[in-house]
Image (tube, grey):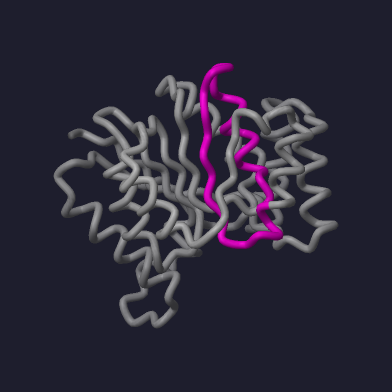
Amino acid sequence: MSAASAIVDAYIGAHLIAEDAALAAALDHNAAEGLPPIDVSAAQGKMLQLYARMVGARRILEVGTLGGYSTIWLGRALPEDGQLVTLELEPHYAAVARANLARAGLDERCEVRVGPAVHSLGAMVAADEAPFDLVFIDADKPSNVAYLQAALMLTRPGSLIVVDNVVRDGRILDTASTDPSVLGTQALFDAVSKEPRLDATAIQTVGAKGWDGFLLARVLA
């Protein structure tokens, strides 16, 4: 199934997603610098970009930068005076991302902040930063609920929260799992289901990145 779905992803890309030197260079740079190949696919990146445009995002928050591939997709959805803040734990990954963003001409629009995301988010809440129109969460899964709680404090009614990797090859159904990533994702579903300020769903995906999915939540109040 994975081989066939990867071919379908290639078909989608060939028909709907233009070749892009900056994005290709970002992936090449990530590989050369030893970053794990866990970026979103091109089709998923384009989907995130369309989400940002559909909500008219002027401020975007990303939790989990890696090498900035998804950051480029999201940053290109912003108007010229828009801002994207992306949070990355690893200083080396952040340096690679900054170089990729500069190559894509987005370094003035996208700010990479380094350190544990929970701490960075706490500082943002304490500083009463302006609300974000879209939040993309794609970092360590055990902290998903903490990221969600911070996102609720950093958004406004009508904002969109997107969380990646919420199906995990179907392991989300394993009630006996001891995998911290599965447990963190199950806790995310539980938290969202009990949160009256969110209207949410989750969509399964299959493609070059395997069987996974995204959780989508609109902030109500």
x then y, percent, for residue 171: 43, 69
Residue at the limit of the structure toward the top, as seen here: 80
Q: Which residue is drawn at 24% across and 30% down?
A: 157
Residue 162 placement, left or right of 33? left
x then y, percent, for residue 212: 50, 56
Q: Residue at x 61, y 42 (%)?
A: 70
x then y, percent, for residue 16: 67, 26
The quarter of the rendered structure image containing the N terminus is: bottom right
Provide the residue span drawn in magenta: 67-94
Q: In this view, does 193 lie above or below 12?
A: below
Q: In this view, does 187 lie above or below 162?
A: below
The quarter of the rendered structure image containing the C terminus is: top left
Is 114 included in the stretch rendered in magenta? no
Q: Residue at x 25, y 52 (%)?
A: 192
Question: In the depicted view, which residue is nearer to us: 75 or 166?
Answer: 75
Question: In the depicted view, which residue is nearer to us: 205 or 107?
Answer: 107
Res. 130 image quadrant: top left
Res. 104 image quadrant: top right
Is 75 included in the stretch rendered in magenta? yes
Q: Residue at x 23, y 58 (%)?
A: 191
